[in-house]
Image (cartoon, helix red, strand yellow):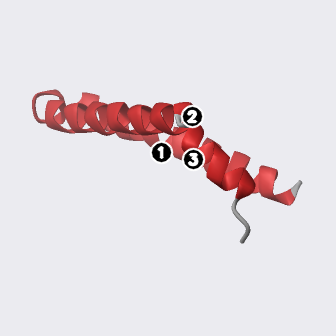
Amino acid sequence: MMEKIGYTLLSVAAVCWLVVMVKGLVAVFPVGIIGLLTLAGIGLLLAKAVKDRVRNREDDHYSKTVER
């Protein structure tokens, strides 16, 4: 229960931080494009990593069957 609350609070803080960052980059438009492109690239790579992890059956098998 406490862990879920912690993850929720961290997620809310991260989303708020991202919104503020995007607003700031839009405010300084000509130079801010570099930051927006960087954020978009990081977001795409993160989405790819999560998608690959979700689809990888081998990792699921080892995480369920290998003793710690």
Which mark is first along the chain, 2 or 1?
1
- Mark 3: give few (<14), some (14-19) or many (20+) Cα within 10 Å: few
How far from the left and from the top, in percent, is residue 6?
A: 74, 56
How far from the left and from the top, in percent, is residue 63?
A: 67, 54
Q: Amino acid under label 2?
A: Val
Residue identified by numbered label 3: 59
Question: Which sits in the foreground, 13 or 47?
Answer: 47
Which mark is first along the chain, 1 or 3?
1
Q: What whole-number distance in Å separates the C-alpha atoms at marks 2 and 3?
A: 9 Å
Q: Which tag is nearer the camera, tag 1 or tag 2?
A: 2
Residue identified by numbered label 1: 17
**Is residue 19 at least partly visible in the picture?**
no
Question: Which sits in the foreground, 4 or 20?
Answer: 4
Q: Is residue 62 above or below residue 36?
A: below
Q: Which tag is nearer the camera, tag 2 or tag 3?
A: 3
Residue identified by numbered label 2: 54
